[in-house]
Image (cartoon, rainbow, N blue to C red):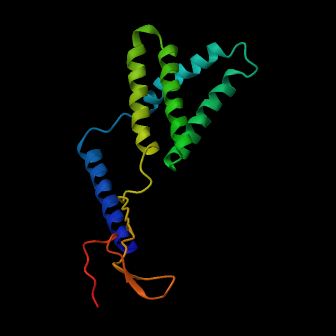
Amino acid sequence: MAAWLRAVIASGALLLAGAAVWLVWTCGPPPPIGAFAELGATITRPVDSYLDDRTTHLAIDASTAYTTWQWTGGIALFTAACGSIAGRLTWSAWAGASVAMVWIGTPAPDREVAAGIAVLAWTAASGIAFRRPSSRPTVVRSRVKAFVPSPRWPSRATGTTTFDADVVPRFRQRD
């Protein structure tokens, strides 16, 4: 596909997405300002409390462990989005560990809801992490070349053309 055609399609898609956002924003009630921050806090506060409780006897403090957790997730997401298998494995392990930390770090009555929100957040972010590097299908063309002996081939000893009826019995000798 030509580059100018891709640019036209991308511009049209952005225009349609912008129009959809504008329609939702003007026609419906405005979303609450802190809604996404509260969802993020539902995940990050239990992780922070989990790390706070479990790093008391370690050489690093809880803030260093929390920063390491954040950086590991960001780097894993980036490398997974670039197509690295190690990045995708790290992203999966990091997401599973994060959901486990949310489960353990949340008080008992709200545990299931917080873990469910964490699973939904990691599932949505995994769309970026596990995307295919290219949307074009891979076409593999294979040309199989087989050696089929000719009924006539020059003899190496004499240099004359000979015919071997035992090797290729279906062909007739032409003179």
Residue at horizontal 40 percent and vertical 9 percent from the top: 109
Residue at horizontal 73 percent and vertical 22 percent from the top: 60
Quadrant in which residue 17 is drawn: bottom left
Quadrant in which residue 19 is drawn: bottom left
Residue at horizontal 40 percent and vertical 72 percent from the top: 3
Number of dots carrying numbers: 0
Q: Nearer the viewer, residue 67 or 95?
A: 95
Q: Quadrant of the N terminus?
A: bottom left
Seen as rendered, the residue at the extreme bottom is 175
- Give the image location of residue 94, x and y in percent: 54, 30
Seen as rendered, the residue at the extreme top is 108
Q: Nearer the viewer, residue 26 or 86?
A: 86
Residue at horizontal 57 percent and vertical 17 percent from the top: 50
Q: Quadrant of the C terminus?
A: bottom left
Seen as rendered, the residue at the extreme right is 59
Side of 28 relative to 71 (left or right): left
Side of 39 relative to 45 (left or right): left
- Give the image location of residue 89, x and y in percent: 52, 36
Say above or below: 51 vs 31: above
- Give the image location of residue 12, x and y in percent: 31, 64
Side of 168 relative to 60 (left or right): left
- Give the image location of residue 63, x and y in percent: 67, 25
Q: Nearer the viewer, residue 174 or 85?
A: 174
Say above or below: 110 vs 33: above
